[in-house]
């Protein structure tokens, strides 16, 4: 299994809208991508300027994740949220069985 973790630092004033959009992104990924097995979103405590969002995603393979990156729903999410994000950190992992 191929695991992706993402930490977004979202501007405080965009927290509500980003929350709605990222929840929809998770839902779309799970419904539309048969090789997306997990897409969890959690929110942390902000510092008054930004709020951290942590995403934990599991795909069958790296190729499955590459398919995810090419979907319309991913690209729409990225376009809509780009100006809301101060920082984005993505890491890839391979799950040990």
Image: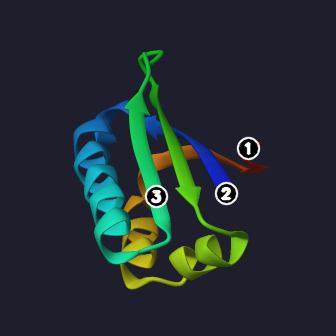
Which quadrant does the C terminus fall into? top right
Task: Say which of marks 3 and 1 sits in front.
Answer: 1
Count neighbours of disc 2 (C-alpha within 10 A) and say few if under 14, some if 14 to 19, many if 20 or more: some
Residue drawn at (52%, 75%) of the image: 68
Residue 88's spot in the image, x, y percent? 62, 47
Mark closest to the chain's N terminus, 2 or 3: 2
Query: What residue is pinned by disc 1?
Result: 97
Q: CA distance from mark 2 to mark 1?
A: 9 Å
Query: What residue is pinned by disc 2?
Result: 1
Answer yes or no: do the residues labelled 2 and 1 have beta carbons within 8 Å?
A: yes
- Which circle marks residue 67 in the picture? none
Answer yes or no: do the residues labelled 3 and 1 have beta carbons within 8 Å?
A: no
Query: What residue is pinned by disc 3?
Result: 37
Mark closest to the chain's N terminus, 3 or 1: 3
In the picture, measured across the screen, residue 90 lies left or right of residue 68, that is: right
In this view of the protein, which residue sits in the foreground, 38 or 21? Answer: 38
Under circle 1, the secondary element is loop
Count neighbours of disc 1 (C-alpha within 10 A) and say few if under 14, some if 14 to 19, many if 20 or more: few
Q: CA distance from mark 3 to mark 1?
A: 15 Å
Answer yes or no: do the residues labelled 2 and 3 have beta carbons within 8 Å?
A: yes
Residue drawn at (38%, 67%) of the image: 29
Residue 9's spot in the image, x, y percent? 53, 37
Residue 63's spot in the image, x, y percent? 68, 78
Which quadrant does the N terminus fall into? bottom right
Q: How is the image coloured?
A: rainbow
Count neighbours of disc 3 (C-alpha within 10 A) and say few if under 14, some if 14 to 19, many if 20 or more: some
Residue 31's spot in the image, x, y percent? 29, 69
Q: CA distance from mark 2 to mark 3?
A: 9 Å
Q: Is residue 82 above or below residue 42?
A: below
Task: Say which of marks 2 and 1 sits in front.
Answer: 1
């Amino acid at each position: 299994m191929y695991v992706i973790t993402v930490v977004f630092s979202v501007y405080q004033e965009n927290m509500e809208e980003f929350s709605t959009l990222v929840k929809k992104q998770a839902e779309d990924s799970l419904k539309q991508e048969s090789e997306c097995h997990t897409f969890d979103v959690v929110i942390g405590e902000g510092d008054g300027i930004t709020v951290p969002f942590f995403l934990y995603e599991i795909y069958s393979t790296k190729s499955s994740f590459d398919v995810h990156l090419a979907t319309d729903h991913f690209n729409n999410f990225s376009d809509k949220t780009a100006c809301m994000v101060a920082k984005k950190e993505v890491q890839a992992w391979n799950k040990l069985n």
